[in-house]
Image (tube, helix red, strand yellow):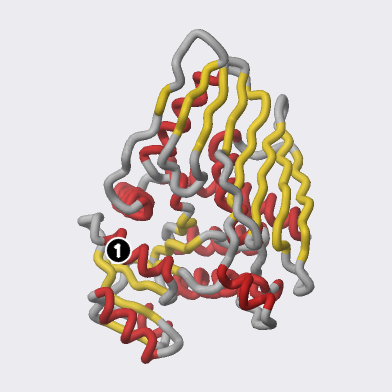
Amino acid sequence: MKIGTIGTSDITRKFIEASLYVDQATVTSVFSRDEERGRAFAEQHGVSQVFSDLDEMLLTSLDVVYIASPNVLHFDHIMKALDYGVHVICEKPLLTSVEQFEAAYAKADEKGLFLFEAMRNLHTPNFERLVTSLERVDYIQSAYFHRMRYSSKYEDYLQGYVHNVFKKEMAGGALLDLGVYPLSLAIALFGEPITSRYEPNQLETGVDATGILTLQYDKFNCVIMCSKVATSYNASEIHGENGTIRIDNVAPISDIEWLPHKGQDRLQLAEEEKRPNMSYELEQFIGMIENNDHELYHKYRRISRDVVSVVEKSLS
C-alpha cells in the first residue's frame, strides 16, 4: 500500500523506519508546509515525492495517509484525507472531543474507509502477553500506570519560549501528550471506567504540566500519573489477590514480571521484540484494510472513543 505522511517530526521518522519492516507498506510521499524542510526530510529517508500542498499529495494514488501534525490539526487533516477517499492512520491523541470523534468516524463509514489511532503500545506481541497474564492475578485489587518524562522543551518554556506541547490552544499538556498512553492501556485491559477524576497541576499557559487521573471500576481503581516536567523511574503495576504484575514501561512494553504472593518464583513473561514497535501497528492496520476486518477494527475504535471521552471530561 502506498502511504503519504503529514509532518516531519521524530515520530514520522520512526514511522517511516517501521514501514521498512512491513512488506505491504511503502511510504511514497511526504507533506510539509515548509518545502525545503520536507525535501531534506524526504531525502534523508529515501522518500521520492515531496509536497507543500496537502491537496496535491492527496490527489496522488495514495492508499493511506499517516498524520503526525500538531494535535489541534488532527481533525481537519483527518476529514480532508477521508474526503479524498484515503484511509487514515493518525498519531495519538486521535482527537480531543467526542463530537470530533463521532464526526470523523461518520465520515469514514460514509466513505467506506478505515480510520486508525496510532497507539503503538496496544499492537505489540508483549501487549498480548500482558493481556493473557491477567488471568494469573485473579481478582484485581488496584492498578497504577504512569508516563512521566521530563521534556527538553520545558527548558525553553522556563526561558520564555513556549512550544506547542505547552500551549492550550494547540491541545498541548501532559495528559494529551503522554497520559493517553497509560490511559489507553488501562482501557484496553479493563474496559471503560465507571467514572474518572483528573487532578492537574497547571502551568501559566493553562495546560497541565503534571496530573493524576483516577479511573473507577466496579471493584478497583486504576491510578494514572503523567508529567512533562518530571520523570518517574518506577514500574507500572497491576495488583491482584494472587500476586502483582510489574510492567517496565507502558509504551513500549519490554518487561512484564509476575511476582506471586507465595508458592512460586517470579517469572518474566515478556519476550524480546526484534523490530520497531510501530511496525506491529502498521502491519495490523494494513491487515484490517486488506481483510476488511471490521470486528478487530471496532475493538480498537471503541478503545479510542473511550480514551477521547475520558480526556475530554478530564480537561473540560
Quadrant including the N terminus = bottom left
Residue reaching furthest top? 263
Name the residue furthest bottom.
36
Rendering coords of residue 255 (x, y %): 43, 37
Position of residue 177 in the picture relative to residue 53 (left or right): right
Residue 51 position within the rendered picture, expressed as x and y whole percent measured from the top left: 36, 85
Q: Residue at x 71, y 28 (%)?
A: 220
- The quarter of the image holding the C terminus is bottom right
Q: Does residue 10 show up?
A: yes
Is residue 100 placed above or below 48 in the rendered structure? above
Q: Disc 1 on helix, strand or loop?
A: helix
For residue 293, above or below residue 260: below
User: Which of the two residues, 67 or 172, is positioned nearer the viewer here?
Assistant: 172
The type of residue carrying mark 1 is Glu
Position of residue 48 measured from the top left corner of the image (x, y, whole percent): 23, 80
Camera sees residue 305: no
Query: Residue tagged by mark 1?
Result: 17
Rendered position, 11 above or below 241 = below
Mark 1 Cα within 10 Å, few/some/many (few <14, many 20+)?
A: some
Tell me where residue 262 appears, x and y as whole percent: 54, 11
